[in-house]
Amino acid sequence: MSGIPASGAAGRVADSTGNWVDNHAPLWTRPYLRLARFDRPIGSWLLLMPCLWSAALAAGMAHDLSRLPLFCALFFIGSFVMRGAGCTWNDITDRDLDDKVERTRSRPIPAGQVTAKQAAVFMVLLCLIGLVVLLQFNSFAIATGISSLIIVAAYPFMKRITYWPQFVLGLAFSWGALMGFAGTFERLDLVAFALYAGSIAWVIGYDTVYAHQDAEDDLMVGIKSTALLFGENTKLALVLLFGVAVSLIGVALKLADAGWFAWIGLAAFAAHLVQQIVRVDIHDSPLCLKLFKSNRDAGLLLFGGLVADAVSRSMA
């Protein structure tokens, strides 16, 4: 991975701002850290949220907190590593498209900071780290985790053929909603699938807001998205998507016999989504980015409620 010109390694990516990678990482590592989006960890946090929800809800159902800290730690590492691998794969497949979009043309591959081959080697290394993390779980959870790779591999191509690439992203980014149950019970039931479906609706909603930053460029180069599909009706679409998300997560809580702490967490999560809908302006790109990033906080509110519920149930 060496042999990158220092000037290329030092160049900042257009859709990023100053951060530890730009300011402190060794020059030769910066293109790779940017490929993995370690300079912009919000996507990793969003990938982590459904993992944490499922781990906490499953712990509450099992009345057993003993594995929750380890599961959360493994999911944290796995989310950051595998999101990095997924983003690298996305950049490899989108390198010609990224060169035509203002926000992405200075990403490491189109900017010439790394070659596609170097990026592929880096992606394999990240996947191997992810495999080590996954092998800490039971065999059912391992098989469940590996199954997600089909969706991850397909996602970058969806924006070329459908206005619903965000749905496929939702399938991939919500997979963690299954993993906590797979790791705890070695099976998947209606609770897991209800949580998974609710998370998918949430992902479609927040990524639609994110996609409005690129709507004009996407239209010119032929990239499809729910942002273009919904257009001026985005606010109404968010009402429906976030409403479905809260309702389905509520179904999961009901099926899991969750207590009041979990419902309070869901109420806080719902209130956060409502204020996003009220504030969103699809023509204000900085605001769209800010609201998109705020979904980490929404997810943590729900997680906090689920953890409190799990603690209370383990003590009952």
Image (cartoon, helix red, strand yellow):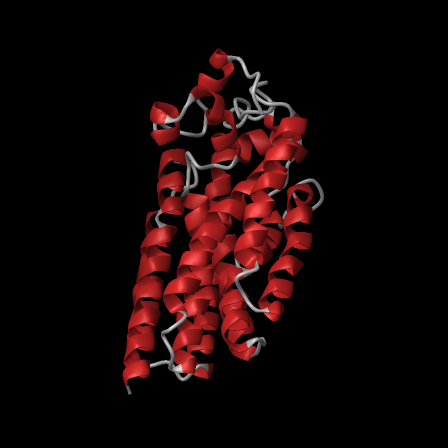
The quarter of the rendered structure image containing the N terminus is: top right
Q: Position of residue 45 (x, y in %)?
A: 41, 50
Q: How many marks?
A: 0
Task: Tell me if residue 5 comes above or below residue 143 in the rendering.
Answer: above
Task: Tell me if residue 241 comes above or below residue 314 in the rendering.
Answer: above
Task: Tell me if residue 118 comes above or below residue 205 in the rendering.
Answer: above
Looking at the image, can residue 228 be seen? Answer: no
Identify the residue at horizontal 53%, vertical 77% (top origin).
Answer: 185
The quarter of the rendered structure image containing the C terminus is: bottom left
Q: Position of residue 152 (x, y in %)?
A: 63, 50
Identify the residue at horizontal 29%, vertical 79% (top origin).
Answer: 260
Q: Position of residue 162 (x, y in %)?
A: 68, 47
Residue furthest bottom in the image: 316
Looking at the image, can residue 275 be seen? Answer: yes
Identify the residue at horizontal 47%, vertical 26% (top origin).
Answer: 29
In this rendered view, identify the residue nearer to me: 136 or 17. 136
In this rendered view, identify the residue nearer to me: 16 or 292. 16
Q: Position of residue 229 (x, y in %)?
A: 59, 46
Q: Quadrant of residue 117?
A: top right
